[in-house]
Amino acid sequence: MPSFPSPRRREGDARVRIAVEFALSCSFPPHFCRSFARHRPNLGFKALPGHRRNVKGAFSRGRVDDQMKLLQHSWSDMLVLDHMHQRMHNNLPDEMALPNGQKFDLLCLGLLGVPSLADHFSDLIAQLEDLKFDVSDYICIKFLLLLNPEVRGLMNWKHVHDGHDQVQQALLDYTVTCYPQIQDKFTKLLMVLPEIHQLASRGEDHLYHKHCTGGAPTQTLLMEMLHAKRK
């Protein structure tokens, strides 16, 4: 029997390829963006007792076709969220210098090539800092972005819908238990989701415009994702 990569591995591989291709379209060296895309935390679920299996399985137990549709519709949102997380919890700087002296604007990378979004991006980070946004919050928000029951054409909509509800419940239980001093933390975190999506959509529009005007490669997974979302 042939062996196939796990859903988690497929998602990770796809995200690495997207990051590399985005880098090429924005003139970032691919070796730098491979490193950036792979520098994502090992998703530990120790802080979500009683919900670990549900949160992890909500995506991995879904149909492969649905997994790809969900990834196609959430990759840019997750890229923006990942960049916020890296800046808040791993001290990701605004720019990075290589040994040869060349510098890269990491903030522009997190904004999908639209530097005019920097103020909105910073405002969102400030909101998250006020809410004591931590790694467990990040995990749940990422899965809420991924498990979007509003994506059209899902083969098993109920599984995605139920998974989304399970992650929401995990986040609610966690915030109420661990952050009782922060009023309405759960609700305020959910209010950040459309803000992240707005940033990501602006970035996608910018990349798609570059593609249509010949300013970005065409036969890439990144452009395939952009086209799939517009069908």
Image: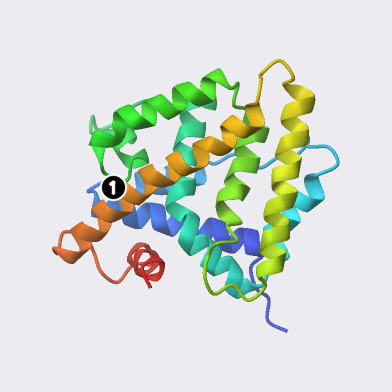
Q: Residue at x 66, y 20 (%)?
A: 183
- For badge 1, the amino acid type reads Pro
Residue 147: image location, x then y, percent: 61, 56
Q: Is residue 77 visible?
A: yes
Place residue 60 in its image quadrant.
bottom right
Instruction: Say whether residue 86 is left or right of residue 67.
Output: left
Residue 192: image location, x then y, percent: 50, 36
Pick the front one: 172 or 2: 172
Residue 28: image location, x then y, percent: 27, 46
Tag 1: Cα neighbours inside 10 Å, few (<14), some, or many (≥20)? Answer: some
Looking at this rendering, what residue extends furthest in the bottom direction? 1
Q: Is residue 91 visible?
A: no
Looking at this rendering, what residue extends furthest in the right direction? 50
Instruction: Say whether residue 140 is left or right of residue 122.
Output: right
Place residue 204 in its image quadrant.
bottom left
Q: Residue at x 73, y 84 (%)?
A: 1
Count numbered badges in the picture.
1
Looking at this rendering, what residue extends furthest in the top direction? 181
Image: 231 above or below 108: below
Q: Residue at x 38, y 45 (%)?
A: 198
Here the colouring is: rainbow
Instruction: Say whether residue 34 is left or right of residue 203.
Output: right
Image quadrant in which the C terminus is located: bottom left
The residue at which mark 1 appears reads as: 29
Residue 167: image location, x then y, percent: 71, 47
Q: Residue at x 62, y 49 (%)?
A: 143
The secondary element bearing badge 1 is classed as loop
Place residue 58 in its image quadrant.
bottom right
Image: 104 above or below 198: above
Pick the front one: 201 or 114: 201
